Amino acid sequence: MSSLRPSPLRAYGSDPRLSKYNPLARILFYDDFDEGMNGWCELVGNHAGDLRDIRKMALDFRPPQLSTCSYFDIGTHGSMEGTYSLKVATRNQPNHLAVAIKRVTSAATGLVQFETYFAFKAEQVVRDRIGRLPGQRNWDGNAAPSELQFGEVTFSNDICSTDPMSRCHGVVRYRNTDPGGNLVQHWMYPTTVEPTTKMERMGLVKLGHPNQDFFSLAPEDWKPVPNGDQPLCFNETASKVNWHYVRWLFDTETSRNVEFQCNDRVMDLSEIEVPKYDEPYHGLPNLLNFYLAVRTHTNVRNFLYLDSVLVSVDW
Amino acid sequence: MLKRSFTAVLEKNSTFCADFATEPYEVGWATEARWFVNVLEVGESVTLRLTAQVSPDGLYWCDEGSPPMEIDRRGLASMPLANFGPWLRLKGQLLDQPGCVRVLIYLALKE
């Protein structure tokens, strides 16, 4: 399937690091994780110096890691190019979410394109240590039980303009399984805003669902992206890492998503409303943040790996 | 290029009232590390023993071999490490229980 918006330049075709990407006219940043963290760090909830003021659900998003993708059965797998990838890892607690963030601002409004090659895995389970988990009993030698232990991957931005003030999060999530452990394999989008510290402190929202979602007001506030049913290549064993291409285009002029591509599937997001905040936010002019998130539904750690990231703009 | 470094906050204002271990953290790129433990609160009769552990795969762990830190008061303590392999974590034991500790735990890594 071809892109709905075939805008990439081909001037980078001779550079083996960039030729796997399809950047817009200007590359804002290119992050090869063989060269370090490149500014990706742990997201933390707002506070004014006292860590006890951080909302519980935003206290423990975990520091990202530079991973070699090493496993007990094969040793080091390595990344798609080089040795290291960026790894975002949950705890081994149901509903635990890990979030890494990179923060910049916009020099102009217009199209922004996020591209990456990513892989997702549940932590290896050694059977003699914790016994059998769901899916292991009827293992057919092909479908990995580990696949059922992986929850969700979420890509999000955080953009804010001041004239007029408009803040929103464009969010796209791959729901691999639901909290019940059922395979879903569908791209999703939220229908409500990400609840902020300000909303909670001003009493604008009441949260507390045991399965509270950081990216929406309520866990059920998600809808399937049209044409977003897409089984991905988890492969047959938890130590077999296959990298997937992602290209996500959004428009900071209109505060809307444009389209999302994963491998050969291109999803049109232009008609999907992005929830906007009603209340004003101070200190965020030209905000342009990128989030990478992974959530487990079980007591198995979930890992999101990124080989590299390229963000380009049309301004 | 300057040598890279990275500091991870592995426990942020966490309260422990029983033995614990920090989350597995990948450190294969680093040649030196230093644990920093900022004890914000400690029970009156509690001693916190912290032992560095290493792993080849993030699943199986053994002690790294450095002498453990033993802390019975508020404040910052640290432990340097080298030749540690691809994964690190810190094992925490509360001696002379019952009691609790509230801590910040940092892992500072350098090429």
Image (cartoon, rainbow, N blue to C red):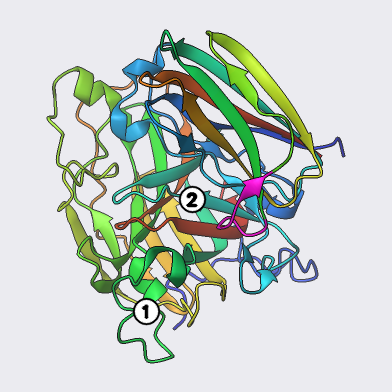
Residue named by callout 1: A231
Specify the quadrant of the image occupied by residue A306.
bottom right
The foreground one among A169 and B89 is B89
Question: On the picture, is B22 further left or further right than A266?
Answer: right
Which residue range is magenta in the image?
Answer: B56-63
Q: Residue at x 47, y 30 (%)?
A: A286
Q: Position of residue A65 (x, y in %)?
A: 60, 46
Residue named by callout 2: A89
Question: On the picture, is A203 further left or further right than A64?
Answer: left
Indicate yes or no whether the magenta region holds residue B59: yes
Q: Position of residue A271 (x, y in %)?
A: 25, 60
The foreground one among A132 and A270 is A132
Residue A280's place in the image compared with A10, above or below, is above
- Spatial CA distance of label 2 from label 1 is 22 Å
Q: Position of residue A192 (x, y in %)?
A: 19, 44
> Viewer-nearest of labels 2 and 1?
2
